[in-house]
Amino acid sequence: MRIRPAIWLLIFCLLSSFSIPATAQTEVVLETLSVDLLPEYDDPDMLIIEKFRLPVESALPVDMTFHLPALARVNAIAYEQNGSLFYVPSARLSIEDGLQIATFRMEYPLEYRIEYYMPLERSGSIRKFTYQWAGDYALSRLLINLNLPPDATGISTMPALTGKAYTLTGEFPALEAGRVFTLAIQYQRSSNAVQTYKQPVESAQPLNSSPVWAERMLAFWPWILGLVGVTLIVGGGLYYWFSGRGKKTVSQKHHPVDKNLLHCHQCGQRAQPGDRFCRTCGTRLRQDR
C-alpha cells in the first residue's frame, strides 16, 4: 500500500513555501536619514552626525557603502542600543576618486550612524559651511537638525530651516538614489570657544544582549515551523501506512466455520449437538443440510 498522492502534494506545497534566501542584495532604501549639524560644538570644526535605519521589513544583514568628502575626519561608525553607542566592527575606510569610502555591514534592526568632522570656512567673525548628502541611497525622509553656538548671530540657511533660538530644523521629502541634497549655512560669532560634549562610543560586546538576539531569532521561526510541519506530515503518512496495512490484514483473515452448528429457524437460538427441538421455543429443528 502506498501513501496517497494527496499527502505527497501537501509535503511538496509545504517545502516549496520556504525558499532559500537569495544571496543578491535588493535595492536599499533608508527609512529616515536624520542629519545633526553641530558647528564649534566639541571641536573648532563642524561635527556631522548622519543617523539612519532601514525599514522594519528589510532582510538583514545589508552591506552599506557611503561616500564622504575627502577632508572628512571620521570619528565613528556606530549603532545605538539602549541609549549607548557601539562601534561597528566591520567598518572600513578607503580612498577612491578623491572621496572617502565608508563600508560596513548592518546586521541588526537598530539605528546606525556615521560621525565625522568637516572644516568650517572662516572669514573674521563669519562662518560658512555647505553640507552635502551624496545620494548613495534612496531616502523615504530627510531630517536636518542644526544646533548653533548660543552666541551666534546673523544666521541664514539655504534652503530655509525653521526653529527658535539656535536650534533650527527642516524636514524634506523623499529623495531617489543618486539625488544630491545641499544645505548652505552662514552665521557670525566673535568667540572661538567650543562647547564640551562628546558621547562615548563603546566596543561592540553588548550585542549579545537578549533583545537583539530575540530580533535575530525571528528570522529562524519560518524554518522551525516548516520542520515541525514536515515532521507532522511524514509522521501522519507513516501512521496512515501502518494502520492501513493492519486493518487490511485483519480484514483478510478467514475464520473457520463449523458446518455442524444448528440454529433455530424460528427464534435463532443456537442448538447443541444432538438436539431435535429448540430449547427456547420448542420448534422442531431442521436437520437437512
Image (cartoon, grey):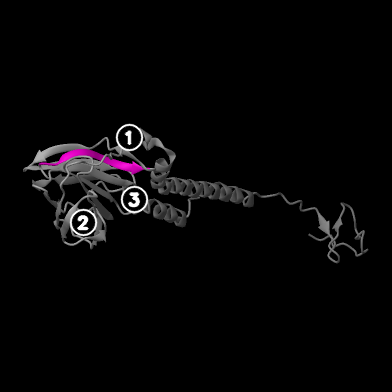
Nearer to me, 269 or 14: 14
Report the amino acid beneath label 3.
Answer: Ser
Q: Which residues are magenta?
A: 71-81
- Could you say which disc has been placed on residue 204 in the image? 1
Q: Nearer the viewer, mark 3 or mark 2?
A: 2
Question: 234 left or right of 284?
Answer: left
Rendered location of residue 287, percent (x, y): 84, 60
The residue carrying pointer 1 sits among few (fewer than 14), some (14 to 19) or many (20 or more) residues within 10 Å by Cα, namely: some
Viewer-proximal residue among 242 and 74:
74
**Mark 2 sits on what residue?**
138
Horizontally, is 194 left or right of 232 in the view? left
Quarter of the rendering occupied by the C terminus: bottom right
Residue 241, image x, y percentages: 53, 48
Task: Give the residue drawn at x 47%, y 55%.
Answer: 4
Q: CA distance from mark 3 to mark 2?
A: 28 Å
**In which quarter of the view is residue 156 placed?**
bottom left
Q: Is residue 89 above or below residue 218?
A: above
**Where residue 19 is drawn, which disc sits there?**
3
Of callouts 3 and 2, which one flags the residue occurring earlier in the amino acid sequence? Answer: 3
Q: Amino acid at mark 2?
A: Ala
In terms of image quadrants, where is residue 265?
Answer: bottom right
